[in-house]
Image (tube, helix red, strand yellow):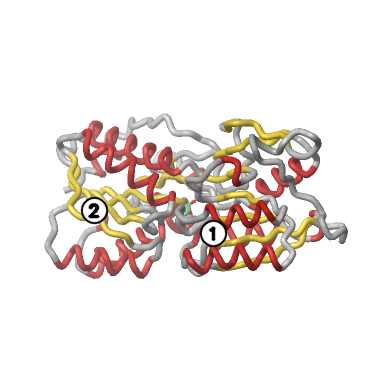
Amino acid sequence: MKIKNVAIAVSGIALALSLAACGGGSTPTADTTTPADGGGEAPAAEGYNLVPKDIDGDGYITLGFAQVGAESGWRTANTQSYKDYFVEANGFKLIFADANQDADKQKQDVRDLITQGAEVIDLAPVTDSGWEPILEEAKAAGIPLIVSDRQLSVSEDLYLTYFGGDMEAEGNRAVEWLTKYMADNSVAEAKIVHLQGTIGSTAQKGRSKALDDAVAANANWSLVAQQTGEFTQAKGQEVMESILQQNADFNVIYSENDDMTYGAIDALTAAGKKVEDYIIISFDGNKSAVQMVIDGKIDVIAECDPLLGPQVGDLIKKAAAGETIAKITYSVEGVIDSSNAAEKITVAFGS
Ligand code: GZL
C-alpha cells in the first residue's frame, strides 16, 4: 500500500526541482558541446562544412522534416511546433514526411526529401541504427542535416547539429525522484513494472538505461515486468492488462511516456485497482498528465520538451548566417510533481 497521503501530511518534501521552463518553447541552454562554425570559410563542424542556404534562390530556406509519426501527444505538439514555425513569414518553406513509426520507411522519406528540393533536412529518427548510408547521401547531395528529438549513434561529421532532450538525464531525474520518495516515505521496496518506449529509439534507450542502472545498484529494487508499449496509449493499456492478468505483485510503474501511462491507468481502473496505491512515474508533461499529478494519480513526470520548431529554426538561421552553433544542444528540462504541478500546468503543452 503506497503511503502517498502520509507524504502529503508530512508535506515538507521540498525537492530541489529544476524550475526550468519546459513546453513553452524555452530557448536552449548553454548545455552544449563541440562548437560548430556555420558558413564562411570555417567548416560548420569538425569535418562537416555544410550550412543551410537558399539553394534555389526563391527567397526561402526549404526545410524537409522527417518526422517519426503521430503516436503520442508529445509528437502532435512537436509536429505542430514545426508547422507553426517553418512558414514563409519566418523565411522558410516546409516539406513534411511522416514515417508512421516505421524506421525503414523513414530512411526512404529522407531520400525523397533530398529529391523533392529540401535545402536542409531535420531528422527525428524512429530508431538510431542504420543511418550512416542515408546521412552520407544527404552530405554528398550538399544538403545539411540536423538531428532533433532523438540522437543518432553516428560520426559527428555526418550531421550539422543535434537539438532535443538528453534522455538518459531525464531517466536519471526520474530515478533520483523515486529514490528520494522511497526514503522520505519509508517505502521498503520498489517492485517495478517498466513500460518501455519504441525499442531502439534513443528516447527508450536513455530512459531504460537510467532505470536498469538503478535496479542494478539497489538491492531493494526489482523489475517485475519490462515490455514496450511503443509510446502509444492503446499498447500501454494492452501491456498493463496482460501484466495484471498474471497477478504480478508491483508497487511502481515506470512508464516512458504519458500516453502509455494513460493506458496503464485505464487498465488498472478497469481491473478494479486503486491507482493511488501505485507510485506512477511518467515522461513528457502533456497538460492532461500534469492534471493527473494534481489529482494524485501520477506521482512524477520527467519533462521532455516537444516545442522544438522555433529553437531548431533559430539554429538554422544562426548557421546560415555563418554563426557558431553547438554540435549538441539539450533542452532545458526538470521534473513535475505535487510541489510544482499547479505552476507547471499553466505552461504545459498539448491537451
Ligand atoms: C522524446 C520523444 C518521445 C516522447 C514520446 O524526445 O522522442 O517520442 O517521449 C514520443 O511521447 O512518442
Give the CA distance from mark 1 to mark 2: 26 Å
- Measuring 20% from the left and 62% from the top, which residue is drawn there? 273
The label number, if any, that marks residue 235 in the structure image:
none
The picture places residue 190, in percent across and down from the top left corner, at: 19, 43
The residue nearer to you, when weighing 154 against 171, is 154
Residue 8 visible somewhere in the drawing: yes
The picture places residue 31, in percent across and down from the top left corner, at: 56, 32
Tell how many labels: 2
The picture places residue 41, in percent across and down from the top left corner, at: 79, 35
The picture places residue 300, in percent across and down from the top left corner, at: 37, 45
Look at the picture and state if 250 lies above or below 213: below
The residue nearer to you, when weighing 330 against 261, is 330
Horizontal side of 94 relative to 97 (left or right) equals: right
Dot 1 alpha-carbon crowd within 10 angstroms: few under 14, some 14 to 19, many 20 or more: some
- Measuring 20% from the left and 48% from the top, which residue is drawn there? 223
Point out the tag, 1 or 2, that comes first from the N-terminus. 2
Horizontal side of 304 relative to 94 (left or right) equals: left
The residue that disc 1 covers is 350
- Measuring 64% from the left and 44% from the top, which residue is drawn there? 160
The residue that disc 2 covers is 193
Horizontal side of 107 relative to 186 (left or right) equals: right
Q: Secondary structure at mark 1?
A: loop
- Measuring 42% from the left and 41% from the top, which residue is drawn there? 170
**Contact check, label 1 and label 2, Cβ < 8 Å:** no
Mark 1: amino acid? Gly
Which picture quadrant has residue 45? Answer: top right
